[in-house]
Image (spheres, grey):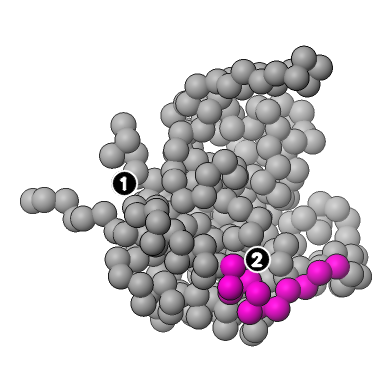
Amino acid sequence: MTPAPSPRLTVALTFDHDAISSEVRRGDGPMTISRGEFGPRVGARRVLELLDREGIPSTWFVPGHTIETFPESVAAVVAAGHELACHGWLHEDLSTLTPDGERAVLARSVEALIGITGEQPRGFRAPYWALSPRTLGLVQELGFSYDSSLMDDDVRLHRVRFGDEHDAAAGTSRLGAPGRLVEVPISWALDDWPHFEPGTGGVGPMSAPSKVLEIWLEELRWAHEREPGGVLTITMHPEAIGRGSRMRLLERFVAEAKGLGGVIFDRLDAVVERWSARHP
Ligand SMILES: [Zn+2]
């Protein structure tokens, strides 16, 4: 049997199901915690309905705290056939932890994921995309197949490079060599959070969905036209994308992608497995 031809473009819709994990870690008050709760209470349900209607498999990066605190929401994600992947326990900034602290957070998170899926998670995404110099080595050592926290490419999967040495005093950098861990690159521009969610007290930028749609559609069209075989990864949060005006944006983005020839949507574990088979 001949293998199926590679799609012109793969679109990976990814959701960081952070819920109230960061807010609890920071000791925020009830209003700020409630903003996170909009994710499991409202946003995730709307997103799951859209994915079901459109027949789209997706990947959800879920902190352990969300698994324990909102088990029904996470169970609905699993029941609908989506992938669960690791995203810390309390949405920690891993760059601030000790080596033992990082290891303990990842081990506890992996255990919670195995508890709900029965399988070792394949994927990791650092909360805030904040990595210590050790994090990705630890992720590789723990047996993950892929990371999705780096911005060195846009639509090309590649192997994470280890052993870089930067010397600020001398003004030099020596680059290391690729390891086994696969990178699924991401970007702030393709993340709903910085566009839509203001800071404390509602102060800060809040984009019109039309602006975000323009950015996402042009990234989609560019990748489809100029980077055949690429993987476009969008990062969303149920508490941000789940608002009505933003759900419209997601619906339009999906409709446009489906209108282009040769576009498929897939979970990142499946995308990475296919890529790794072609790049042993
Ligand atoms: Zn997150």
Q: Which residue is mark 2?
A: 192
Q: In x, y percent, where is residue 43?
A: 63, 75
Question: 209 and 30: which one is in front?
Answer: 209
Q: In the figure, is residue 119 to the left or right of 20?
A: left
Which residue is at a point 44% across and 38% down the rendered structure image? 158
**Residue 245 in view, yes or no:** yes
What span is colored magenta in the figure? 204-215
Residue 213's label in the rendered image is none
Q: Is residue 187 magenta?
A: no
Q: In x, y percent, where is residue 51?
A: 45, 74
Question: 61 and 101: which one is in front?
Answer: 61
Q: Is residue 9 above or below residue 240?
A: above
Cβ atoms under marks 2 and 1 closer than 8 Å: no
Between the C-alphas of marks 2 and 1, the distance is 27 Å
Q: In the figure, is residue 273 to the left or right of 235?
A: left
Q: Circle 1 — which element? A: helix
Q: Is mark 1 within 8 Å of ligand 1?
A: no
Which residue is at a point 44% across and 59% down the rendered structure image? 223
Which residue is at a point 81% across and 59% down the rendered structure image? 23
Q: In x, y percent, where is residue 217?
A: 51, 70
Report which quarter residue 267 is drawn in: bottom left
Q: In x, y percent, where is residue 57?
A: 40, 65
Question: 62 and 71: which one is in front?
Answer: 62
- Residue neighbourhood size for the residue with mark 1, other residues' Cα within 10 Å, grouped as few (<14), some (14–19), many (≥20): few
Q: Is residue 208 magenta?
A: yes
Which residue is at a point 26% across and 54% down the rendered structure image? 6
Q: In the figure, is residue 275 to the left or right of 110?
A: left
Report which quarter residue 193 is drawn in: bottom right
Q: Which residue is mark 1?
A: 274
Q: Is residue 32 above or below residue 247?
A: above
Badge 2 or badge 1: first in the primary sequence: 2
**Residue 78 in view, yes or no:** no
